[in-house]
Image (spheres, rainbow, N blue to C red):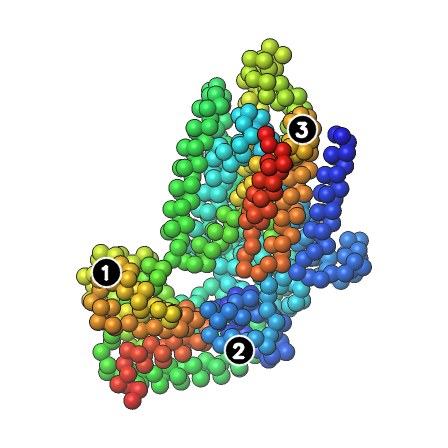
Amino acid sequence: MRGRAGLILGLILAGAVVLSLVLGDSNLGASQLLQALLGRGDELNRTILWDLRLPRTLVGVAVGAGLAASGVTMQAFFRNPLASPGLLGVSAGGALGAVAVLAAAGLMTGGLALGGTAGFLAVPLAAIAGAFLATGAVMALARRGAGPEHLLLSGVALNAFFGAGTSFLLALSAGKFEVSGQILFWLMGGIENRTWEHVAIGLPGILVGCVLLLPLGRPMNLLSLGEPAAQSLGVDVKRLRWQLIALSTVLTALATAVGGVVGFVGLLVPHLLRLAFGPDHRRLLPLSMVGGAALVLLCDLPTRFVPGGLRLGVVTALIGGPFLLWMLRRNPC
Amino acid sequence: MVSQTVGTDELLAALAEPGQIAALSHLSRDPGFTPDVKALAKYPCLRTGTAEDILRFRPDLVLAAAYTAPETLTLLRRAKVTLVVLDRFETLADLYDSARRIGAALGRPERAEELIRQWQGRVAALDQKLRGLKPVRVLAVGLYPFTAGAGTTFQDLCDHAGALNVASEQGIRGHQPTPNEKVLNWKVDMLVTDQGEGMRDKLKAMPPYKFMEALRKGRLVEIPGPLMSATGQARLDAFECLARALHPEAFR
C-alpha cells in the first residue's frame, strides 16, 4: 500500500510538473518545447521554458512541499488535525514584511519597478525577515519550555499583531490603488513571474527542511500517543518539540517568502492523505510533500488562463474546501 | 510593441502606426477604465499581463508603469525586450513627457510633437474661454469615501477646468479618506464624482456627503469614470467636460 500510494502521488506530481511546463500563455507546440528543452530552436521559446515556466514550476513544488510538510509537523506537534502552518504567526509575519516593503515603495517612489533586481528581491527578502522575526519569537518561547497551549496562545497573539500591521499598511495604501492592488495580490498568494532568484531563496532551504523532517516520522508517531508514553518509549520529547517547531516555522517562512500567503495546502493535504493512507507519519510526511507540491502546481494552472487576477491562494481554497468536506463525509474522523 | 498598462494604451494607439502595435493591456477592453473602447478594440489585448502573456506577442518594446510588478519587468529584461517604464501620470506636463518618451522609443518623435501641439492648442483654447472667471470650489467625492488632494490627476483636472480643489487647499496630498467631520466646515460650491447609475441618490444617503449643503442643493457634477481617472490624452476631454459643467456661461 505504501509503495502504491507513493507511486500514485509521484505520478500525479510528475503529470502536474509536465502540465506546468507545457501550459502557458504562449501556445508552444510539443516540438517547440522539446527544442527549447534541449536548448535549441527559437531563443524566445527557450526563455519561456527555462526562465519563466521552470522557475515557476520549481517554486510551486517548493511552496507545496514546504507547506504540506509544515502542516503535518504542526498537526503532530499539537496533536490536533486542525493545526496549520499559519497557526504560530509565521505566515502573518512574512506577510507583514512583504507588505511593508510594497507599501513603503509604493508610497515613496510610486512602485518597485524602478528598483531593478533589488526591487523585486526586496519583497521575498522582507517576507523572510518578517517570517523569521515571528519564528524567532516562537523559538524563544519553545526554548523556554513553553507547552503547546502556551505556544498556541502566543501564535494567536502574533497572528493578531502582524495581521493588524498588515491591515494598517493596506489601509494606508488604499488611496494608491495600484499599490493596494499589489498588496492584495501578494496576500492571496501566487507563483507567476517567479525567477531563478526565487528558486534560490526558497527551494534549497525547503529541500533541506524536508530531508531533516523525514527521520522524525517515528518519534512523531510516538508523540501522538501522548507525551508520557513517548517519553517512556525513549523519545526526548523536549528536543523533539523544539526540532518540530524549528523545521515547521522555517518551512512556512520560506514558502511564504516565495509564494505569498497560500492558504489551505498545509491543512488540506495532510488531512486528505491521512484519510486515504492512514496516520503513520513515516509515510504521511513524504506523501504530503509530494501531494502538496502536486496540489500547488495543479491549482496554479487555472490562474494562467483566467484574466482579472484569479490567484493561487483562492484556487487552493476553492478546490480544497469542498474536496475536504467530501472526504470528511465519506470518512468521518 | 505591447502596452502593459491602461495608462499607456491610449498613448501608444495615438503615437504608433497601427502595424507597430502587437497588443494593449486587458483593460483596453473595459469601458470602466478606457474612454474609447471601440477605437482600441481592433488591437489584440493581454490576458493576464504576466511576462509570458506579454512575450507571446514577441514584442521589441514594452510600455509599462512604475507600478508594474517588478518581477515582470525583470523577466522581460532578461528576455532582451526593451522597456519604457513611465513613472509620472499626474499632470499635463507628465502626459507631454510620456508622449515624447514613447514617440522616441517608437522612432516617431515628430508624431509626438505634432500631438503635443494639438493638445496644447486645445488647452490654450479652454484657458481662453475660462479667462477671468472665478474658479468654482470643488471637492472630489465617491462611494469609496476618499477624496483627491494635491499631486493627483484630479488636481490637474481642477487646474485646467476653472476649479479650485478644496481638499488641496485644506492640505490634503494624494488620495486620502474624506475627513468626515471637517469636510462639513469646508466651503464647497460643487461636488465632483464618477458617473454612475443612481450616484446622486447613493451619495445623498451617505454620510458625510448627505449633510453637505452642496449636495442638498443638488450641486453635483458627474464625470464619466474613465475621464475622471484619465492619465492619457483623454484627460483633455475631462478638462472640457468639467469646465462645461462648472462654467456653462463660457460655452454659450
> Residue at position x 67%, y 25% from top?
A280
Q: Hey, which quadrant is residue A321 in on the image?
A: top right
Between B210 and A92, the one lying in front of the other is: B210
Q: Quick one: quadrant of the C terminus of chain A?
A: top right
Secondary structure under tag 2 reads helix
Secondary structure under tag 1 reads helix
Residue A278 badge: 3
Q: CA distance from mark 1 to mark 2?
A: 39 Å
Subunit under mark 1? B
Q: How many C-alpha atoms fall within 10 Å of the one at disc 1: few (<14), some, or many (≥20)?
A: some
Q: Quick one: quadrant of the N terminus of chain A?
A: top right
Q: How many C-alpha atoms fall within 10 Å of the one at disc 3: few (<14), some, or many (≥20)?
A: few
Residue B183 badge: 1
Subunit under mark 3? A
Secondary structure under tag 3 reads loop
Position of A169 compared to A80: left or right? left
> Residue at position x 44%, y 54% from top?
A180
Q: Is residue A210 visible?
A: no
The amino acid type found where label 1 is placed reads Val
The amino acid type found where label 3 is placed reads Gly
| Same-subunit check for callouts 1 and 2 | yes
The amino acid type found where label 2 is placed reads Lys
Q: Nearer the viewer, mark 1 or mark 2?
A: 2
Residue B38 badge: 2
